[in-house]
Image (spheres, helix red, strand yellow):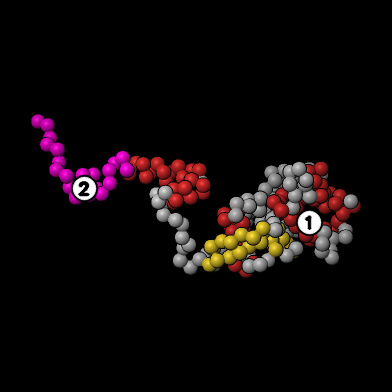
Amino acid sequence: MPKKPLPPQEGNAGHLPFSRRTLLQAMGVSGTAAALGGGLVAAAQAAGTVAPATSEPGEQSLTLKVNGQPHTLQVDPRTSLLDALRDRLQLTGTKKGCDHGQCGACTVHVNGRRVNSCMSLALMHEGDDITTIEGLGTPDQLHPMQLAFVEQDAYQCGYCTSGQIMSAVALANEPYGDSAAEIKEAMSGNICRCGAYSHILAAIEQTRKA
C-alpha cells in the first residue's frame, strides 16, 4: 500500500521565504565569487547579493609601507608582521618556516635592518619602511645578491632562499663579516636544511668582491 505524502511541516520547503531556484542561484554566486576572488565579490556587493565586508571586533587600522608602497589594513592586534605580509598583502616570497624565530626563512628588512617577521607584531611597524624579497629585484633585473645566489647555485629546495638573501643583503651594510668565519657567524640565524652553506658563503663573498 503506497504511503501518503507527509503534510508540509514548519521549516519545509513549502514554508521557506524563498524558492529552491533562488537558493541555488545565491549559492552559485557566492561559490563562484570565492573561487575567482575580489573582483567578482565587489560586483556581487554592488548588486546587493553579498553583504560588504566589515572589520572584526577588536581589529585595528594599520598602514604599512612595504616595498615603497603604502597599504592600509584592518588587523587583529595579535597578527604578526609575517602573517600580514603573506595573508593580507599576498607577498608570499617571505616564507613561514618555524614560526618561532629560529630558522630565518621569514627575514625582511625594517628600516634597513633584518628582522624575523614571525616574531614581530604588525602593529609595531606603523610608518616603518619594510622591504621583502619582492622589493629587491625583478626577474628581468635581479639584485646583485640574487644573481650571485643563482650563479653560485646557493639553493636547493629554495624554501630558505628568500630569507638567506635578505640577511645577506643586510649583512653588507653591517660592520661585520670581513672574513669567512664572520660571515658564517652573522648568517647563523638562517638555517638551510639542504646544507647549501658553502654555496651561500660563496655567493656572499662574490658580491663583496664586486
The local crowd at label 2, few if under 14, some if 14 to 19, many if 20 or more residues have their Cα within 10 Å, is: few
Q: Quadrant of the N terminus?
A: top left
Instruction: State the image coordinates of residue 199 (x, y, percent, origin top left).
Output: 80, 47
Magenta region: 1-22
Q: Quadrant of residue 85?
A: bottom right
Question: Which sits earlier in the primary sequence, circle 1 or circle 2?
Answer: 2
Q: Is residue 48 above or below residue 32?
A: below
Residue 130 visible in this rendered orientation of the protein: yes
Magenta segment's dominant SS is loop
Residue that appears at 31% across and 40% down? 21
Write down the residue under mark 1. 169
- Say few, some or many: other residues with alpha carbon within 10 Å of mark 1 (under 14 / 14 to 19 / 20 or more): many
Residue 2: say if magenta: yes
Q: Check residue 15 in the rendering and tell me which mark sits there, or answer none.
A: 2
State the CA–CA distance, disc 1 to disc 2.
66 Å
The reply to whether the C-beta atoms of the residues labelled 1 and 2 are less than 8 Å apart is no
Q: Position of residue 118 (x, y in %)?
A: 62, 60
Q: SS class of the residue under badge 2?
A: helix
Say whether residue 126 is left or right of residue 170.
Answer: left
Q: Is residue 197 above or below residue 176?
A: above
Residue reaching furthest top? 1
Q: Name the amino acid, label 1.
A: Val
The image position of residue 143, as x and y in percent, is 78, 50
Residue at coordinates 53% horizontally, 62% vertically from top-left?
A: 74
**Of labels 1 and 2, the one closer to you:** 2
Q: Is residue 38 magenta?
A: no
- In the image, 199 versus 108, the foreground residue is 108
Nearer the observer, 129 or 114: 129
Q: Mark 2 is on which residue type?
A: His
Q: Is residue 198 visible?
A: no
Q: How many marks?
A: 2
